[in-house]
Image (cartoon, rainbow, N blue to C red):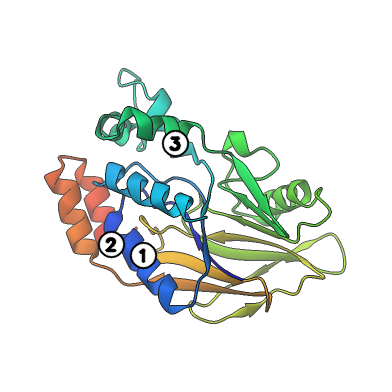
Amino acid sequence: MKYALLSDIHSNLHALDACLAHAQTQGVERIALLGDLVSYGAFPSEVVARCQALQDEGAVVVRGNHEELVQTHNVNTPNPSLGSQTAQWTHDQLSPAQRFWLETLPLTERVDEMFFVHASADAPERWRYVEDERIAGLSLDAACSHPDVRYVFGGHVHHQSLYYRGTGRQLMAFKPTAGVPIPTPKHRQWIATIGSVGQPRDGNPRAMYAVFDSTSAKLTFHRVAYDHRAAASAVREAGLPEFFAQRLETGK
């Protein structure tokens, strides 16, 4: 079965729709949404509605730190984080039913040999970034304590990366190339961060997502062009901080 893996949508409806359309051309049969559906962008309610519909069709959905932030934000916090700057606005755009849905999403899900999580599987509620071999190893060890798990998929870092465990315990990093399928044989253990649909931060504004073929055991990272200028204009029209519009335009 082919899975589309999407994370860090961040209320960017333009990017989400572009990635879903691209996934259809890849023959995807099921979707996994790996958290941070909201914040930063101009369309939180529309994105949540789209994700709820996908869940009704069988998509896996897990909770990210921004789903938590829109519930717990405090506008009086001194020196608020970047996420906190849009949390109040995002909270107000969502219906009570949508906020409840976000609040009740699970932190992790397991499907066959796959483990889905937003951040690090060893402590998903701490929102640690899987951005080096050490944290990747801790996350992989925790997920693979379930004997059938061979693949861990997450987001959070807004970059695309892949690590695997070789013959020893040390993890090896593999640099993916967009559009090139990577053999990920099941006799090894693998952990990937699939990048951000709605807010890339590597200097390239194209949206990120990945496709995993569980039958052929191949993982393909994708970059998808979309109307990022329209998404940035929507951020400005919503009265959100200019920084978030510029980030969509530059991918930084």
Tags 1 and 2 touching, CB below 8 Å: yes
- Please name whichever residue, 151 or 122, is drawn nearer the observer in this view of the structure: 151
Residue 81: tell me if it is visible. Answer: no
Tag nearer the camera, 3 or 1: 3
- Label 1: how many residues lie within 10 Å, few (<14), some (14-19) or many (20+)? few
Residue type at mark 1: give it: Gly
The answer to whether 252 appears left or right of 187 in the picture is left
| Residue 19 rendering spot, x and y as whole percentages | 38, 66
- Label 2: how many residues lie within 10 Å, few (<14), some (14-19) or many (20+)? some
Residue at image position (40%, 59%) is 197
Q: Residue pushed farthest right? A: 168
Mark-to-mark CA distance, 3 and 2: 29 Å
Which quarter of the image is occupied by the C terminus? bottom left
Tag 3, which secondary structure?
A: helix
Residue at image position (16%, 42%) is 238
> Of callouts 1 and 2, which one flags the residue occurring earlier in the amino acid sequence?
1
Q: Which residue is mark 3?
A: 102
> Of callouts 3 and 1, which one flags the residue occurring earlier in the amino acid sequence?
3
| Residue 116 rendering spot, x and y as whole percentages | 62, 52
Mark-to-mark CA distance, 3 and 1: 30 Å
Occupied quadrant, residue 173: bottom right
Residue type at mark 3: give it: Leu
Occupied quadrant, residue 120: top right
Tag 1, which secondary structure?
A: loop
Q: Which residue is mark 1?
A: 203
> Of callouts 3 and 2, which one flags the residue occurring earlier in the amino acid sequence?
3
| Residue 61 rendering spot, x and y as whole percentages | 52, 48
The answer to whether 11 appears left or right of 112 in the picture is left
In the rendered view, would you say 114 is above or below 129? below
- Please name whichever residue, 105 or 123, is drawn nearer the observer in this view of the structure: 105
In the rendered view, would you say 207 is above or below 79? below
Q: Which residue is mark 2?
A: 250
